Every structure is written in C-alpha cells, then in structure tokens.
Amino acid sequence: MFHFTTGIPELDKENEELFLAGMILEKIGNKAGLTTHEFYKELVAQGVDLELSENVMLAAIAIETMLGVDMEDEYHTEH
C-alpha cells in the first residue's frame, strides 16, 4: 500500500483510511452495486481491526459518493 505522510497526525490517519478503503474497493472490483456486506467481508478478510473498520467504511462511502457524482456527468472514474 502507498504510504503518504504530512506530519499532521489527524490528516495522516485520514489519508491512511482513504488509501486502505481505495485498496479494498479496487480488490473487490469496479462493479456498480457494491453492498456494505461485501465491503465488510473484505475488511474482515484483510484483518482490519474493529476500531479502524468504521472509519475505513466511511472513507469508502466518501470515495463511492464522489465516483457516483462523476458518473452522473457521464464521466466514468475507476478506483
């Protein structure tokens, strides 16, 4: 996984969660209609601890929301 640090602990933590969410989304695939259950199943398979899993799930929702907006404008983005 890509490691990017800024030296600002809060931002570094958020970036780590976003990169992990992106990695999991890429592993699952770019198909439409991904369910929460499918994502959570992959979180468990990756060994993500419970404390981190909620924030990673929220990061994935943020990524998918941004991708959904892109698709409305007929511009398709891959993870």
Image: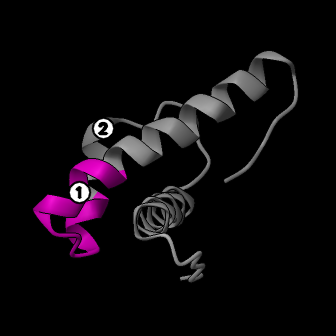
Q: Report x, y in % for residue 31.
A: 59, 42
State the SS at label 2.
helix
The answer to which image quadrant residue 14 occupies is: bottom left
Residue picked out by circle 1: 53
Q: Report x, y in % for residue 68.
A: 65, 26
The answer to which image quadrant residue 70 occupies is: top right
Residue most extreme to the top: 72
Going by the image, does 6 lie left or right of 14? Answer: right
Note whether 70 is above or below 64 in the view shown: above
Instruction: State the scheme by which the image is colored.
Output: one colour
Residue picked out by circle 2: 36
Three-letter code, disc 1: Ser
Q: Report x, y in % for residue 10.
A: 40, 61
Note whether 53 is above or below 76 in the view shown: below
State the SS at label 1.
helix
Number of the label disc, if any, that sits on residue 19: none
Q: In percent of the image, x 62 and y 48: which residue is there?
A: 30
Going by the image, does 48 lie left or right of 5? Answer: left
What is the span of residues highlighted in magenta in the rendered image? 42-56
Q: Report x, y in % for residue 4.
A: 60, 79
